[in-house]
Image: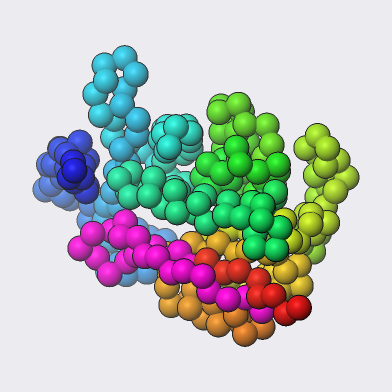
Amino acid sequence: GKKSQFPPPAINEKYKLTRQSLYAQAEQGLLNKTKKKKKKRGSRNGALGATLLFRQADDDPETGDPMVVTDHKEYMTTTVKGIRFRYQAGNFFQNNNHVLPLMVDAVVEAATKPVTATGKPPSFLIDCYCGSGLFALSAASQFQLCVGIEVNDKAVEEATDNAKLNNIDNCQFVAASAEAIFTSPPELTMPGFEQYKVQELARQETVVVLDPPRKGCSPEFLEQLYEYSPQRIVYMSCGPATQARDAKGIVEIGGYGIVSIQPFDLFPQTKHIESLIIFEKRDHS
């Protein structure tokens, strides 16, 4: 099959040009000015350095040329499995466009597998730490209702706008910490679910997707998750160590079994991976 290159050629080329510009600035002393304010961690005498951002967006619609975004405030669009995601370049979004579709496929496939007790796929998806809506919007066509929660207000705005951009009308996104989705959730506003709350969705018909930051899930959130006790948990992690810590509680306290574990190498030639664990509620009957 066709081999994928990461970073892609367009980013490599942009990096060369940016590096030349930075060398020129360094020669002029522009990257070594001492700040009078407090030092940043890892700096000497408050010396300034350069933090570089390179994201490959969808090709330019007019020229067809690859587009590489370097300004963290600039908005860009990335299409994943036919769904368009528009987001601010500095906000969180997976950066390997070759492996990302494989991750999405794995999450959606796991989330939609039939439940043994009913023989039917789950009806509801709760996407915690949802970001710009990647997993919820990618899976929306196979669920009656998807609810996403994200602490970053800007990302929630992006997720809501991305639903409209893709004509998806069964997703609601909420700006709050993951802990709030079970303790003080807002009333749902989607047609047919008005005045429902998340914890009132049928447990045996619900799958919860987790994609927390590297520190993993908080004990407070996990306690609420165990109490709600969804049929299935789909846990994507960029920190396998904290994921393993959380998995111990999900299995021993939550009463789940591990169905599968799958790593994804989004960061070649580094120690970092994404890890996907699928948990299913054990039948104690």
Please report the residue visible at 31 percent of the width from the left and 26 percent of the height from the top. Answer: 59
Magenta highlight range: 254-277
Residue 110 position within the rendered picture, expressed as x and y whole percent measured from the top left: 52, 56
Image vertical order of residue 117 relative to residue 285, above or below: above
Q: Is residue 20 left or right of residue 247?
A: left
Please report the residue visible at 30 percent of the width from the left and 60 percent of the height from the top. Answer: 265
Count of residue discs: 0
Is residue 275 a member of the stretch shown in magenta?
A: yes
Q: Is residue 230 left or right of residue 199?
A: left
Image vertical order of residue 217 relative to residue 154, above or below: below
Q: In this figure, which colouring scheme has been used for the structure? A: rainbow
- Front in this rendered view, residue 42 or 90: 90
Q: Is residue 174 left or right of residue 103?
A: right
Please say whether residue 81 is visible from this viewpoint.
yes
Residue 60 position within the rendered picture, expressed as x and y whole percent measured from the top left: 31, 22
- The picture quadrant where one finds residue 181 is bottom right
**Quarter of the image with the N terminus in it:** top left
Residue 229 position within the rendered picture, expressed as x and y whole percent measured from the top left: 72, 69
Q: Is residue 159 left or right of residue 263?
A: right
Which residue occupies the extreme bottom position in the image?
Answer: 252
Please report the residue visible at 49 percent of the width from the left and 73 percent of the height from the top. Answer: 243
Residue 18 position within the rendered picture, expressed as x and y whole percent measured from the top left: 19, 41
- The picture quadrant where one finds residue 21 is top left
- The picture quadrant where one finds residue 198 is bottom right
